[in-house]
């Protein structure tokens, strides 16, 4: 799928560099890309997380507005904002020339747990907004504890010693999909063309526009910041991170890795999974993780009218 | 409906109606020309948002009411909508206020103006629907200003004043208008509904649309600071704005008086001109206290009533001035800070301590928890004890009001529950009084 000619006009350098995020931060990368596609007419509504420190007083990397709410209620903050803008417009108290994009920005911890109720409320009310969840698979800002998005086998600072996280990753995509938002997609900073096309498509939708971005996190996952892009590509090529899009009740994969690499390549590259390889190789766990990925893809292929080749 | 179709002559007059405290609150928001109401139901507040929802639906009000999934969300949306320039009103009670508490601190720090009516209800556990002030006092330190009402009229007036107060550039803090559940929220009283045109002159459309959230401008709200000095600076700003809000209220109150003929001073004094003894209460308990004051006055006791209408900012100087010249002051708290006692008592003591000696003898009573009735007999007994304290100089320990009749009925409940009594009755736990529910 290629981006339509002229459809994507990113404005590079809209976002200033030199933030206090860690080098190689996958969350920052995706925010930067989405912001450059949406342009300046944006209000970010942020929940507690690493990216809260993008805009500490008195600085901001954005040429747009930013409001920090709480860990739980950024979507509700977006609702108040959108409601107010619409009411004031209808009363002629603000001029209505430009469309302001209200963009909720939260981590996976906020999205999967404490903020799920306010997200569900906003989706249920069909709020016209964007939601970007940057998923670094842990409570990053507090030192990378296990979150509902932490994958099976990953070590975190609350699963530091034993077999790592014992639960598979919570399926936020399906939870959000059950609300049938106007637009829903998974993205990753390492696939900028795919991301660009998705943002462009979402722009045309009225209602909730939901994005989950896998956000490789050098600090929490344990890899060299210079490998951030490689980790992102491995996540896609091993099928760990499926790039999907859901519109009108139908989910499609926007990139099908052929052939899929073994998940082992992805796991090996990160310190959080090292305990699966040494001192003893945990084939049982590695196989379980591989099987889960294979099954998910097979399930999806089975549901297709013409079975794509894997 | 007021004004409108009935012609301009009528439109200049106010209209008198029987309204519950909740309806009066809704009328306040309506007359105030509210743009936006984020809402979530809770007894005994729900009637307020139902009335507003109906008015948005039938076109009496232009704007929007959005039902949220929690008070935490509701409070967040109130903050962002107010930040975007909408005149915003909301209402809650009890568990709802506590559920939103994180955001109450946050939005007060955003320095956004809006009005919230809290209908006071005791907090779990145990669960109750009836009134006391622990809910609203949990918001005491949030940065919200607080007005406490004793009548339905006061509720309506307070909402109008609160919009002006909150939106004043010198203040820019959200305001809670508090009323007691049941005794006020569900009690119908005659209320003077001011004329809409007059209200519009007193409270024009919000003209302070905030640029902050307009999109293409690099401004932020509610962000992190990186050190204690910066943090302190912003907190001090709030403190100065809150302290400075008292003289602002006095300005607004003058205008309000010329519109309605009604005063709205930070403290309401009843028969205090020549008083030697004062009762201090907050909210609609004041109505009962007034009856007691009248009866005691008839018996020759020079007692009066002081009812702070505004608790934040705390009218410290005015209270110290009025109460400082008393021989005895009895504070009846409709709240309880376990391990401390009456919250209001502590604050009154702080106000009085700033005065030179001699200071009045200050007694403390806890009453009216969970809607418990405080009888005229109890108020009299309270004043009697305070008179004795002022003569002997010996101030009794804080007393938890409980009659012998109540003690007997709780023993019965305990028998049914097969529950052993944890405390022997007797002072200070029981008052030694028989019940008096007249
Ligand atoms: C109500 C509340 N509880 C806890 C915190 C502490 N806290 C701040 S950030 C954070 C982790 C957020 O995790 P996530 O949403 O995944 O974002 P990340 O930090 O990974 O970017 C926590 C627990 C908070 N700010 N508010
Ligand atoms: S901890 Fe991870 S997500 Fe947080 S700023 Fe650093 S790299 Fe980014
Ligand atoms: Mg996270």
Image: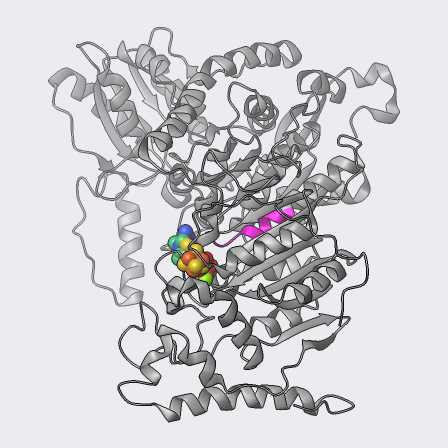
Is residue B356 within the magenta segment?
no
Q: Which residues are magenta?
A: A71-79
Task: Say which quarter of the image contains residue B377.
Answer: top left
Instruction: Look at the image and tell me whether residue B232 can be seen.
Output: yes
Q: Residue at x 66, y 44 (%)?
A: A42
**Ligand 3 falls in which quarter?**
bottom left
Residue B375 higher or lower than A37, as above or below: above
Where's residue A82, x and y in %?
Answer: 68, 45
Where's residue A100, x and y in %?
Answer: 71, 44
Between residues B115 and B16, which one lies in front from this camera angle? B115
**Main secondary structure of the magenta stretch:** helix
> In the picture, which quadrant includes the N terminus of chain A?
bottom right
Where's residue B266, x and y in %?
Answer: 45, 18
Where's residue B186, x and y in %?
Answer: 57, 41
Relative placement, left or right, of B109 versus A186 is: left
Instruction: Look at the image and tell me whether residue B20 can be seen.
Output: no
Q: How is the image coloured?
A: one colour
Q: Residue at x 42, y 68 (%)?
A: A147
């Amino acid at each position: 799928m290629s981006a339509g000619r002229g459809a994507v006009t990113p404005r590079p350098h809209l976002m200033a560099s030199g933030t206090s995020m860690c080098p190689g931060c996958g969350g920052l990368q995706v925010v930067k890309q989405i912001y450059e596609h949406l342009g300046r007419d944006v209000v970010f509504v942020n929940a507690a997380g690493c990216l809260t420190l993008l805009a500490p007083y008195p600085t901001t990397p954005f040429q747009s507005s930013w409001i920090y709410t709480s860990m739980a209620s950024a979507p509700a903050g977006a609702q108040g904002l959108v409601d107010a803008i619409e009411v004031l417009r209808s009363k002629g108290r603000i001029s209505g020339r430009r469309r302001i994009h209200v963009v909720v920005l939260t981590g996976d911890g906020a999205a999967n747990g404490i903020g799920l109720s306010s997200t569900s409320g906003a989706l249920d009310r069909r709020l016209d907004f964007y939601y970007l969840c940057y998923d670094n698979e842990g409570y990053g800002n507090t030192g990378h504890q296990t979150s509902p998005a932490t994958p099976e086998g990953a070590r975190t600072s609350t699963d530091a010693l034993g077999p790592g996280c014992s639960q598979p990753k919570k399926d936020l995509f399906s939870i959000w999909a059950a609300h049938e938002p106007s637009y829903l997609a998974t993205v990753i900073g390492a696939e900028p063309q795919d991301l660009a096309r998705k943002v462009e498509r979402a722009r045309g939708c009225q209602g909730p526009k939901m994005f989950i971005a896998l956000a490789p996190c050098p600090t929490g996952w344990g890899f060299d910041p210079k490998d951030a892009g490689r980790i992102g590509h491995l996540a896609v090529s091993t099928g760990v991170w499926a790039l999907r899009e859901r519109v009108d009740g139908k989910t499609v994969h926007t990139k099908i890795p052929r052939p899929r690499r073994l998940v082992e390549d992805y796991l090996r590259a990160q310190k959080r999974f090292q305990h699966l390889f040494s001192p003893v190789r945990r084939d049982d766990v590695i196989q379980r993780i591989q099987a889960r990925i294979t099954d998910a893809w097979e399930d999806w292929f089975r549901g297709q009218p013409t079975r794509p080749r894997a | 409906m007021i004004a409108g179709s009935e012609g301009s002559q009528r439109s200049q007059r106010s209209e008198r109606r029987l309204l519950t405290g909740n309806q009066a609150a809704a009328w306040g928001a309506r007359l105030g020309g509210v743009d936006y109401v984020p809402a979530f139901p809770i007894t005994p507040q729900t009637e307020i948002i139902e009335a507003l929802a109906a008015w948005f639906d039938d076109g009496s009000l232009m704007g929007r009411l959005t039902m949220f999934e929690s008070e935490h969300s509701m409070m967040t949306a109130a903050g962002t909508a107010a930040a975007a320039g909408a005149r915003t009103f909301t209402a809650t009670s009890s568990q709802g206020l506590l559920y939103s508490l994180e955001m109450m601190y946050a939005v007060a720090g955003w320095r956004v103006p809006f009005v919230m009516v809290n209908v006071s209800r005791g907090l779990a556990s145990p669960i109750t629907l009836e009134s006391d002030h622990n809910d609203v006092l949990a918001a005491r330190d949030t940065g919200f200003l607080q007005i406490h009402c004793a009548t339905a009229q006061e509720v309506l007036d307070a909402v109008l004043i609160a919009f002006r107060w909150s939106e004043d550039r010198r203040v820019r803090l959200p305001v809670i208008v508090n009323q007691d559940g049941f005794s006020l929220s569900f009690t119908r009283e005659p209320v003077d509904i001011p004329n809409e045109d007059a209200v519009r002159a007193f409270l024009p459309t919000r003209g302070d649309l905030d640029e902050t959230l307009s999109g293409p401008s690099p401004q932020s709200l509610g962000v992190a600071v990186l050190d204690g000095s910066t943090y302190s600076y912003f907190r001090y700003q709030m403190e100065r704005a809150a302290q400075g809000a008292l003289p602002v209220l006095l300005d607004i109150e003058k205008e309000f008086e010329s519109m309605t003929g009604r005063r709205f001073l930070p403290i309401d004094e009843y028969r205090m001109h020549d008083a030697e003894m004062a009762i201090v209460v907050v909210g609609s308990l004041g109505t009962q206290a007034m009856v007691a004051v009248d009866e005691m006055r008839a018996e020759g006791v020079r007692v009066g009533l002081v009812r702070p209408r505004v608790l934040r900012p705390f009218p410290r100087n005015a209270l110290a001035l009025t109460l400082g010249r008393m021989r005895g002051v009895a504070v009846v708290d409709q709240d309880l800070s376990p391990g401390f006692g009456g919250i209001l008592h502590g604050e009154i003591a702080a106000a009085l301590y700033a005065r030179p000696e001699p200071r009045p003898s200050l007694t403390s009573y806890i009453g009216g928890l969970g809607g418990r009735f405080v009888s005229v007999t109890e108020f009299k007994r309270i004043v009697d004890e305070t008179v004795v304290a002022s003569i002997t100089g010996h101030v009794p320990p804080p007393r938890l009001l409980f009659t012998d009749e109540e003690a007997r009925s709780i023993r019965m409940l305990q028998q049914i529950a097969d529950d052993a009594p944890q405390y022997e009755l007797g002072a200070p736990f029981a008052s030694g009084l028989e019940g008096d529910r007249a």
